[in-house]
Image (tube, grey):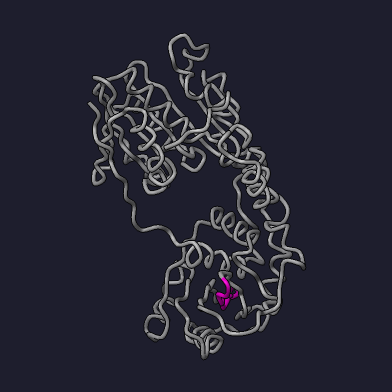
Amino acid sequence: MEFSPFSEKQLRALNWWCPGSPDAERDAIICDGAVRSGKTLCLGISFVAWACGMFCGQSFALCGKTVRSLKRNLVTTLLPALAEAGFSCKFKVGENLIEIGYGKNRNRFYLFGGKDEGSAALIQGITLAGVFFDEAALMPRSFVEQALARCSVAGSKFWFNCNPESPNHWFYREWIQKAEEKNALLLHFTMEDNPSLSRAVRKRYKSLYSGVFYERFVLGKWVAAEGLVYPFMTDAMFCDVPAGEFDEYAVSCDYGTVNPCSAGLWGRKGGVWYRIDEYYYDSRRTGVQRTDEEHYAAIAAMCEGKKVSCIAVDPSAASFIEVIRRHGKFRVRKAENSVLNGIRQTAVALREGKIRICRCCTDAVREFGLYRWDEGRADDAPVKENDHAMDDIRYFVTTVLRPSAGIFAVAAPRERG
């Protein structure tokens, strides 16, 4: 693995705990700021170097929103970097445990996922000498505080890495704003703090985001979500249906009975997915509710003559999913339904041109002009109206365009004598 020279801020994150450092007496470090700013890997290296330099035979925790995301975001790059630096690493995948040693010192690093309030129970009972939180702002407060409470070994420290969220977020209020009170070193990163990023790559990332996501992921600001969710979706962003045949077809559906039912027919051509047709039924508009079978028949008619690879459906629509399965004509997939992450992925897919919305999808075009953030809420959430085509488009992006990886593999380096 090749490294570019570290920036001044990265070096401070790497060395803050070292004896003689002006920050050595701090109890914690918080690195927040822009995406791709080089904070995750250098903080991970620093954490392991500190643990193996100061302790032997102790337990530590590496925490992410999920164990899978932690492996993807941190572990897959951290282990090769440590091996290159002379650390010995043995990854016991089935136990979510990494044994890491340097010189005579060897310690245990357990992997934990903190995705919801119930996750706090997973970390109870263990005694830790330190904990690392990757994307701390994505974890519930109960999990973070339970992990911190497990750090009872003398000399233990806390390590936080995150991208900004809402200024009403608990982590911003309790740690970012109270860093000095908690004796924590706060380092704010921008893309310019990552020397490995070329000017062209920085420019590309800046072009991918707009609105609140630009301010958070590019500028690294803790700002509130307000205004349109997709402010860049002007008339020029919509297109006509391309002529000719498509390589593949798929459908995404946000199911509703009282609320509108929205389904989009997608066709892939030249590596781009186009939303070429839609079924949108609003019972309030017509005054008549439709049954699951009637919704199915309308979607099947929209797909007539086309070989559809799958239908991605709102996972809560159990009865409708069962209707699709019973007919046996289409493969049905329960859609990934993480709203905020799905909106971010959809915005990037639209900006990159990986998906295009055709003008004939009039209800989708209409909703893009109305879909807004709920400014009355403390957390980030869109207003629950004019969001049905928006939801089915999000389901397509997270489930068909960018499905979750189901396999993870890592090679554990040999121990060095």
Q: Is residue 266 covered in magenta?
A: yes
**Residue under the point 53% across and 86% down:** 303
**Residue under the point 44% across and 44% down:** 73
Name the one closer to the observer, 357 or 204.
204
Residue 333 as seen in the image, left or right of residue 34: left
Name the one closer to the observer, 251 or 373.
251
Q: Which quarter of the figure has residue 165?
A: top right
Q: Residue furthest front?
A: 2
Residue 370 as seen in the image, left or right of residue 259: right
Q: Residue furthest right?
A: 235
Q: Main secondary structure of the magenta part?
A: strand
Q: Which quarter of the figure has residue 107?
A: top left
Residue 123 in view: yes
**Residue under the point 50% across and 76% down:** 250
Quadrant housing the N terminus = top left
Q: Position of residue 196 (x, y in %)?
A: 55, 37
Residue 28 as seen in the image, left or right of residue 209: left
Q: Is residue 154 covered in magenta?
A: no
Question: On screen, 401 above or below 82?
Answer: below
Q: Which quarter of the figure has residue 82?
A: top left
Q: Position of residue 15 (x, y in %)?
A: 47, 19
Name the one closer to the observer, 274 or 243.
243
Q: How many marks?
A: 0
Q: Magenta segment range?
A: 259-270
Q: Position of residue 316 (x, y in %)?
A: 45, 67
Residue 263 in view: no
Q: Position of residue 379 (x, y in %)?
A: 59, 46
Residue 342 as seen in the image, left or right of residue 134: right
Name the one closer to the observer, 104 or 22.
104
